[in-house]
Image (cartoon, rainbow, N blue to C red):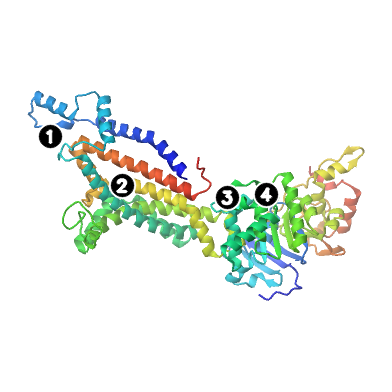
């Protein structure tokens, strides 16, 4: 378990995760430097949450296959023994779940569940662990923290629960924080508070964060880098600026154009542009089309797209897996007029 | 919590009165004259009327009920028509015997039921699950008087290891916790334990499978708990429901064991009820049904309180 201090926080090389005959994650390469925040975005079923859970090896061995390389802070996660894995979880890398009401055990107080995690990883007495939990509650700004420690999960509000979940994740001072759609279950006003809290904690504690979300706004708010996933692969990755302002993959363009803000901002001939959707639906992963998985829905698809496109560098550290990155970029800059999308609608 | 218990006690009072009314009326609905059992067939009308007046059967039903209830509230369940002994003493002795038998049976059933349930729930759809499920289905569906007779044939008649009937070597109806008496309780208790075992096993299996499929189990693993740590959480989550089922099973066994108590001649409430019904011993019948029903009410109350203490999501209102 020797950890190289210069190793990246998370490094995935050709990660494949399969259930039965279906490869849900199909060759993901990802590198997260220490102290960085990366957002993993994509539609439901794109494999982003599966990728995140694979980093903690949360899938039962019998019913899943995980291949490739997973390295977290220099540790080879797939080589860890059961005991080492339990020591690693929560201590080196911790996870924040989408629905905190379901992610807390309903019959224990929240404080008890946090001290349980602390005492699992460190030799510390009950009073000391409670003191730590109290400090954590103050850190995530839960009002009247002393009282909230003795509350049961169902006695808290949604935003408060997610703060408590973040406190739980931070309990054993992990280096890597894995956040699985942490704001999806919350009200819009609470969402932004949680995102800002995550950002603040990341800066103050030097955390490395992977944020899984389908909300581009949330991604931009928190992340230095954005990776876009589609059908179990990363199709575009770059800094938040590169991906949002200068997208080079038709799928990223589709995601950007399907946002309400985009349609409101761009006016065509004095009228608001219509909200655009991506035609069709994500591929059935059991019958994956040959070549680029996005080709059947792509407004730029050509015959060549039946071959798997390589990841090409289109800017400094900005990669897109597409044969027609130039055309895609040009089409985005020209404005909202995808040809195939109109025809299909 | 104390306030909650008090509130529940107040809420239980009308239920208890309702139960007493049903107990009283139920017996009067049954056909036949209670006095026919003790009076000779050629008794004169004058004798019959005299006996009627002596037992109070000549008064209108509401008055009879009021008198009966008044006595019951003072701890007087009347005198058995068949034996002439106070009903309270008969019923108490029988209830103690049944309680002992039912408790031992529930304990055996609960132990094996939870064991099978956890194994099956943890290894769903495996061979272990099938075996455990088969045993529990057998437990729920086998006729218990038949199982009792088979047990007697095998362990008493053929092997001669255990006594087939009664509660003790002296033939008396008082069970004591010593080795000789223990030998008498094994066969009826094991036979009886098969019912709660099957029900508890199936309930616990479903509970465990349901708990293991919940998000918080993944979250527990994500914070570094090993399987032992996760198991503790599963037990704590399954406990309220499992204990509730156990309490209800104990209640059923207390009153519903007529067949098994008859097969093994166990001097409990089932045996007593059986006798009271066949002898049309009205006071005895009313008394034992009332005591059994009250036991059930009390057990339900206990289960409620226990569940509320164990599960913070149940409101203590």
What chain does mark 2 sit on?
A: B
What chain does mark 1 sit on?
A: B
**Could you say which is closer to the camera, residue B233 or residue A297?**
B233
Q: Is the residue marked by circle 4 packed among few (<14), some (14-19), or many (20+) residues within 10 Å? A: few
Q: How far apart are the two marked residues, 3 and 2, measured between alpha carbons?
A: 37 Å
**Residue tagged 4:** A143
Query: Going 29% across and 52% down the picture, which residue do you hit?
Result: B100
* Discs 3 and 2 carry the same chain letter: no
Query: Going 17% across and 58% down the picture, which residue do you hit?
Result: B169
- Dots 1, 3 in contact, CB < 8 A: no
Secondary structure, mark 3, is loop
Secondary structure, mark 4, is loop
Residue A290 in sight in this render: no
- Dots 4, 3 in contact, CB < 8 A: no
**Residue tagged 1:** B38
* Discs 1 and 3 carry the same chain letter: no
Disc 1 or disc 4, which is closer to the eye? 4
What chain does mark 3 sit on?
A: A
Quarter residue A108 falls in: bottom right
């Amino acid at each position: 378990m020797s950890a190289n201090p210069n190793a990246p926080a998370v490094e995935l090389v050709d990660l494949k995760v399969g259930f039965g005959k279906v490869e849900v994650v199909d060759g993901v390469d990802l590198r997260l430097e220490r102290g960085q925040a990366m957002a993993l975005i994509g539609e439901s079923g794109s494999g982003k949450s599966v990728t995140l859970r694979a980093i903690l090896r949360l899938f039962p061995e019998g019913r899943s296959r995980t291949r490739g390389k997973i390295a977290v802070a220099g540790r080879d996660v797939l080589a860890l023994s059961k005991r080492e894995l339990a020591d690693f979880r929560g201590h080196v890398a911790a996870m924040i779940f989408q629905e905190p009401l379901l992610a807390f055990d309903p019959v224990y107080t929240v404080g008890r569940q946090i001290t349980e995690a602390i005492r699992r990883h460190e030799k510390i007495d009950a009073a000391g662990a409670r003191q730590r939990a109290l400090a954590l509650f103050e850190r995530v700004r839960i009002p009247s923290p002393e009282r909230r420690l003795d509350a049961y999960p169902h006695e808290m509000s949604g935003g408060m629960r997610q703060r408590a979940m973040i406190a739980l994740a931070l309990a054993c001072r992990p280096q890597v924080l894995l956040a699985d759609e942490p704001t999806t279950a919350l009200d819009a006003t609470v969402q932004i508070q949680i995102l800002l809290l995550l950002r603040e904690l990341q800066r103050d504690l030097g955390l490395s964060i992977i944020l899984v979300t389908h909300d581009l706004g949330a991604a931009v708010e928190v992340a230095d880098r954005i990776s876009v996933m589609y059908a179990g692969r990363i199709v575009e990755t770059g800094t938040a600026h590169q991906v949002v302002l200068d997208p080079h993959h038709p799928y990223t363009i589709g995601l950007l154009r399907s946002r309400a803000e985009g349609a409101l901002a761009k006016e065509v001939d004095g009228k608001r542009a219509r909200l655009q959707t991506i035609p069709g639906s994500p591929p059935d992963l059991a019958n994956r089309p040959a070549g680029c998985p996005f080709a059947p829905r792509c407004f730029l698809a050509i015959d060549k797209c039946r071959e798997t496109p390589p990841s090409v560098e289109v800017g400094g550290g900005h990669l897109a897996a597409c044969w027609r990155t130039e055309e895609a970029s040009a089409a985005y800059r020209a404005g909202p007029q995808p040809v195939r999308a109109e025809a299909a609608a | 919590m104390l306030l909650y218990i008090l509130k529940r006690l107040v809420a239980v009072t009308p239920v208890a009165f309702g139960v007493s009314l049903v107990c009283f009326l139920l017996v009067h609905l049954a056909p036949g004259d209670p006095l026919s059992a003790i009076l000779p067939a050629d008794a004169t009308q004058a004798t019959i009327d005299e006996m009627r007046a002596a037992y109070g059967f000549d008064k209108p039903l509401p008055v009879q009920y009021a008198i009966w209830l008044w006595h019951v509230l003072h701890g007087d369940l009347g005198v058995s028509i068949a034996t002439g002994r106070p009903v309270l003493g008969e019923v108490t002795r029988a209830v103690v015997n049944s309680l002992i038998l039912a408790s031992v049976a529930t304990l055996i059933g609960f132990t094996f039921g939870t064991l099978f349930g956890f194994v099956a729930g943890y290894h769903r759809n495996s061979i272990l699950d099938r075996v455990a499920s088969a045993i529990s289905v057998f437990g729920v569906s086998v006729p218990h008087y038949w199982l009792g007779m088979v047990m007697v044939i095998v362990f008493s008649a053929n092997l001669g290891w255990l006594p087939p009937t009664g509660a003790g070597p002296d033939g008396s109806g008082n069970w004591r916790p010593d080795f000789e008496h223990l030998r008498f309780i094994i066969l009826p208790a094991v036979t009886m334990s098969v019912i709660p075992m099957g029900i508890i096993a199936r309930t616990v299996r479903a509970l465990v499978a349901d708990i293991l499929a919940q998000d918080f189990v993944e979250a527990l693993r994500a914070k570094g708990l090993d399987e032992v740590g996760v198991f503790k959480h599963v037990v704590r989550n399954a406990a309220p429901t499992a204990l509730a089922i156990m309490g209800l099973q104990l209640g059923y066994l207390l009153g519903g064991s007529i067949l098994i108590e008859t097969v093994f001649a166990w001097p409990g409430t089932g045996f007593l009820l059986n006798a009271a019904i066949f002898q049309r011993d009205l006071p005895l019948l009313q008394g034992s049904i009332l005591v059994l029903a009250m036991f059930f009410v009390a057990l339900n109350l206990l289960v409620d309180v226990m569940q509320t203490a164990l599960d913070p999501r149940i409101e203590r209102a």
